[in-house]
Amino acid sequence: MQAVRERLTVAVRARSVSNPDHIQIRPASSTVRVVLPPELASARSDNQRSSWEWTYDHVFGGESSQEKIFDETVAPVVDAVLRGYNGTVLCFGQTGSGKTYTHTGSTSQFAQRGVAPRAIARVFSHAASQPQYETLVTASYLEIYNDTLVDLLTELPGPGPESLSLVDCESSTTVRGLRAVAVADEAAALEVLFTGERRRSVSCHQLNDRSSRGHAVFTLSMEFRSRVESSGRVTRAKLVFVDLAGSERLKKTQTSGCLRGESVYINQSLTHLDQVVVAAAVSRGP
Ligand code: ADP
Ligand code: MG
């Protein structure tokens, strides 16, 4: 169980809730408790529960800073990648709940930057502290919009845009034709991240005036090669950030036309993701 816990951690980040008596965010015990209001609880028949509690690896309240979120949840993933393990950070939640804020953060305020730019800084400060290794980093940025693959980096200099296709290899799934841009330092990697961010599909609706309309996958691929050992051994690892488009209740977002069509694709793909997670959990066993 310990090994599984180390491989997969779940953190809940809650924004301030309007009814804290009934939705209790408890960082100290890493729990979220939901208590039915008395009028609803009394309407239920005997022996039916009126409260529920879930325990996670981390629970953060509305006051938690971007720095705290990164240090306690994502920094350990980055450090594992720097030791040669692949790592993925996936932001999941209802539209408007703060996924893109957590992933990218504010571009105008340094303190508000999200986990992806902080991870980039950590990767390159590690590389600078290890001059005995040559570190090569490439970045790619993919969007899945209305079930189609979009390369968000085609604006950058490089070969012309190619059509993208999914290729299933034995051990992994890759996107053929997706541009991978070599990034020599933190500034170059941030430039790639924000170039891709600007190209993402966003729209305004009732719950979010910059709602992501597609799932975004930002990948840093790394190679570490010793400059002192002659064995020529190369360690490769990938750090993947997935900023999902949020699940949307059409009644709440009040969307129609094209936006409504996008919502249907978003919800459908999240349902498929849910099925994959359940199947993976079942195949792995307790
Ligand atoms: P999502 O990506 O989940 O749909 P966003 O990240 O776009 O939602 O967040 C919606 C709005 O709320 C944005 O204007 C964002 O800056 C703001 N926001 C989200 N979470 C926070 C937070 N923890 N602190 C301050 N502002 C936040
Ligand atoms: Mg978003």
Image: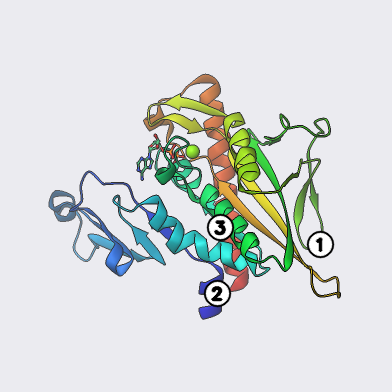
Task: Quote the CA–CA distance across marks 1 and 2.
Answer: 23 Å
Q: Is residue 1 visible?
A: no
Extreme-bottom residue of the structure: 2
User: Which of disc 2 and disc 1 is earlier in sequence?
Assistant: 2
Amino acid residing under circle 1:
Glu
Task: Quote the CA–CA distance across marks 1 and 3.
Answer: 31 Å
Image coordinates of residue 162 in percent, x first then y, are: 82, 33
Residue under label 2: 4
171 sits to left or right of 31:
right
Q: Quadrant location of residue 95? A: top left
Image coordinates of residue 253 in percent, x first then y, are: 40, 29
Q: Nearer the viewer, residue 265 or 201?
A: 201
20 sits to left or right of 260:
left
Amino acid residing under circle 2:
Val
Above or below, comparing residue 12 to residue 97 in the picture = below
Image coordinates of residue 237 in percent, x first then y, are: 70, 62
Q: Nearer the viewer, mark 3 or mark 2?
A: 3
Could you tell me which secondary element the residue under label 3 belongs to? helix
Task: Quote the CA–CA distance across marks 3 and 2.
Answer: 25 Å
* Residue count near mark 2 (Cα–Cα under 10 Å), binned few <14, some 14–19, many ≥20: few
User: Which of disc 3 and disc 1 is earlier in sequence?
Assistant: 3
Amino acid residing under circle 3:
Arg
Q: Nearer the viewer, residue 283 or 150?
A: 150
